[in-house]
Amino acid sequence: MPNANNDSHYPQSTNELSQVQRRAVSELLRVSPVADDLARRFQEAGFTLALVGGSVRDALLGRLGNDLDFTTDARPDEVLKIVRPWADSVWEVGIAFGTVGCNKRGGSDNQVFQIEITTYRSEAYDRTSRKPEVSYGESIDEDLVRRDFTVNAMAVALPQKEFIDPHNGLEDLAARVLRTPGTPQESFSDDPLRMMRAARFAAQLDFEVAPEVVEAMTAMADRIDIVSAERVRDELNKLLLSPKPRKGLKLLVDTGLADRVIPELPALRLESDEHHRHKDVYEHSLTVLEQAIDLEEDGPDLVLRLAALLHDIGKPKTRRFEKDGRVSFHHHEVVGAKMTKSRMTKLKYSNDLIRDVTKLVELHLRFHGYGTGEWTDSAVRRYVRDAGPMLSRLHKLTRSDCTTRNKRKANALWRAYDGLEERIAKLQEQEELDAIRPDLDGNEIMEILGVGPGPQIGRAYKHLLELRLENGPMEHDAAVAALREWWATQS
């Protein structure tokens, strides 16, 4: 790819640069049948088209997927005229912001590419507005300068494959550093969410954030308040689902952004002194998150990661210094579950996600009453019932919550939990624990008692469920006898 910049702006290592370019060429060749075909259609209509932003960055990193971002001088209505006869499907969800989306099957493997084409633009926030005001630009340079970071401000003009890098993004990519095309103050004023994106990209790409960017994030942290909760939530999710969320979360805390977005996290940095020593709850929570990630089986799990991060947020409110010098956090799991629900509600998470994460936070300490296996079968059944569909995640969270450096203690905890899981598996095989219910259903209860629907049937059902949890499955006749015996005490 021809270079639009002076060679002095690029890394001194010729091998390093050539490797980056080879990776990019390989990635671009894979998408060329689709990208070049689309570019020729824009060219024939009198417009330009360039691959841009994260697509170029990922091509240079050798990880370009099937989501392709393009920029053009064509206005959205003109883009629609070009892509509608060509694409397999078209959508206009982002057209108010100058973006047209479409799907197109093609390439060597006949894959489906998801494409977004955005008109050259510039956008800025009004001081009191939650939405950017969009105005269209006239040149690609004008478009690139409004991008969030230099590594996302590169483009490849198509079909000629001209590399455009007015802000030395390739140099920053090679150095693994995040900088802004203009001043970070201007960039974050245009869109304060970019401060959170800095943390997200640090976590996703394992890049360092330039000192002047960190300084601006710290000074302008309060500007994040103008961004809608939904956009903040989505950015936080991307950060949490990244390969190195600790890196991004620490940046949010260190710059003060977390105080505005998820203040329960920095609040975990509890003071300790020589008389009241205890483990750093903040660092512990980040370690639990990392250990939970190590236990994931089917890719990133947002429910598990949120629960791992938030499981101890009730500790600051429940901390007590005992007379013997110990520090206690009685019922912090209950308080933490309430705080989790409150914070997730403010961030506009779905009710289902809030329910699942809150359940894990509430139950994360339950295992510590297990000891070395003292639980009865009844207690094991209740553990399974209370966890419900979250049982597998609860296993992972509980194991992740062991961060002690005492290997003997850690091994003992793991062996104990191995024993609990074995008991659960054995009882599940014997009793179908995943579907615990009374040995008689509601219709049978009404028929045996000779009464219709009502609160009495509900109480009877609950009584039989308690017997089921306490004693395991009962034969039908025994269940009927137990029901009649209970009923005789109700009159």
Image (tube, helix red, strand yellow):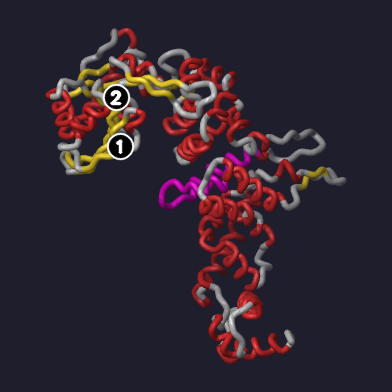
Q: Amino acid at mark 1?
A: Glu
Per the picture, the main secondary structure of the magenta-coloured stretch is helix
**Tag 2 residue:** 119
Residue 224 x/y as whole percent: 55, 27
In depth, the one of 451 and 20 nearer the eye is 451
Residue that appears at 28% across and 36% down: 101
Q: Is residue 133 magenta?
A: no
Mark 1 closeness class: few <14, some 14–19, many ≥20 residues within 10 Å: some
- The range drawn in magenta is 282-309
Q: Foreground residue, 300 or 408?
A: 300
Residue 29, given in percent of the width and then of the height, sits at: 18, 31
Quadrant of image for the C terminus? bottom right
| Residue denoted by label 1 | 92
Q: Position of residue 68 (x, y in %)?
A: 28, 33
Q: Quadrant of residue 321?
A: top right
Disc 2 secondary structure class: strand
Residue 6 located left or right of residue 310: left
